[in-house]
Amino acid sequence: MASIVIVEDEHRIRDLLAKALADRGHHVETYGSALTGLQGIIDGTPDIVLLDMGLPDLDGAELLKMIRAVSTVPVIVATARSGQVEIIRTLDAGADDYIVKPFSADEIEARVRAVLRRGGGSEVSGPTCVGDLEIDVVGRRVTLSGELLDLSPKEFDLLAYLAERPGEVISKRDLLATVWREPYGGSEKTIDVHLSWLRKKLGESAADPRYLHTVFGVGVKLVAPET
């Protein structure tokens, strides 16, 4: 679980978000102003920062510059500002992700996981194995019983994400947010189609699953076939 600093001036949003993330196992520190938040980031060395832009003492864009001057901590901007120019400017200034209010705790946590995965890319690790399925994230290769599978980029991303959490049921909303980067308005049909393609390449079907199991009304999980 991650150590998270929230810099948000609206106490209701700050408290609700902090409680939701803490309930999911994260360590959370909250600050209601830019300068106290900056000091908390310097002192606490968190894994990730959730930053609102409309702060009472300093604009969030200025705080982002100050953070970047002293730290490489990943920053997710969570704000009501939805203009495309603002989003591009903020990402170019050093934000790692940008989410527009209103949002749910599940969506925020999905963004946290995605940013932390990208940040952990410097660690070299071996392929992930689930049964006879081997997923090499670095080389973007998947083999099944030693045979190379021909996957599209999105099929690979979907399978790799599920393989990071084998046996865990992942909601389609989570998959839309993390794999498709569509937390709002995305179609779950897209996931169903890609799962169907993946199943065909894994030699299975929804009616007779081996690796990909759908839990009705909840999501999908990747598991090793029973022997």
Image: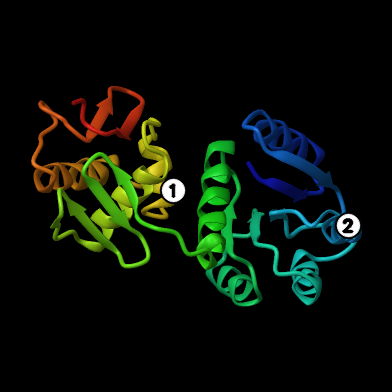
The residue depicted at 28 percent of the width and 22 percent of the height is 216
Cα separation between marks 1 and 2:
31 Å
Pick the front one: 45 or 172 = 45
Q: Is residue 144 above or below residue 223?
A: below
Task: Residue 103: give x, y in percent of width and height.
Answer: 57, 43
Residue at image position (86%, 48%) is 32
Q: Which sits in the foreground, 91 or 149?
A: 149
- Placement of 8 over or under 17, stated as above or below: below
Category of crowding for the residue at label 1, using alpha-carbon neighbours closer than 10 angstroms: few (below 14), some (14–19), many (at least 20): many
| Camera sees residue 204 | yes
Q: Position of residue 166 (x, y in %)?
A: 37, 37
Report the coloring of the rendering.
Answer: rainbow
Indicate the quadrant containing the N terminus: top left, top right, bottom left or bottom right.
Answer: top right
Secondary structure at badge 1 equals helix
Q: Is residue 202 left or right of residue 12?
A: left
Image x and y of residue 121, in percent: 50, 64
Q: Is residue 92 left or right of residue 206?
A: right
Asked whether the viewer can see residue 185, the reply is: no
Mark 2 lies on residue = 43
List x then y, in percent, for residue 210: 17, 32
> Pointer 1: what residue?
177
Q: Residue at x 79, y 57 (%)?
A: 45
**Which quadrant would the C terminus be assigned to in this image?**
top left
Q: Residues within 10 Å of mark 2 (few under 14, many from 20)?
A: few
| Disc 1 residue type (three-letter) | Ala
Q: Which callout, 1 or 2, points at the residue further toward the start of the chain? A: 2
Name the amino acid type tagged 2: Asp
**Residue at the location (56% across, 73% down)?**
88
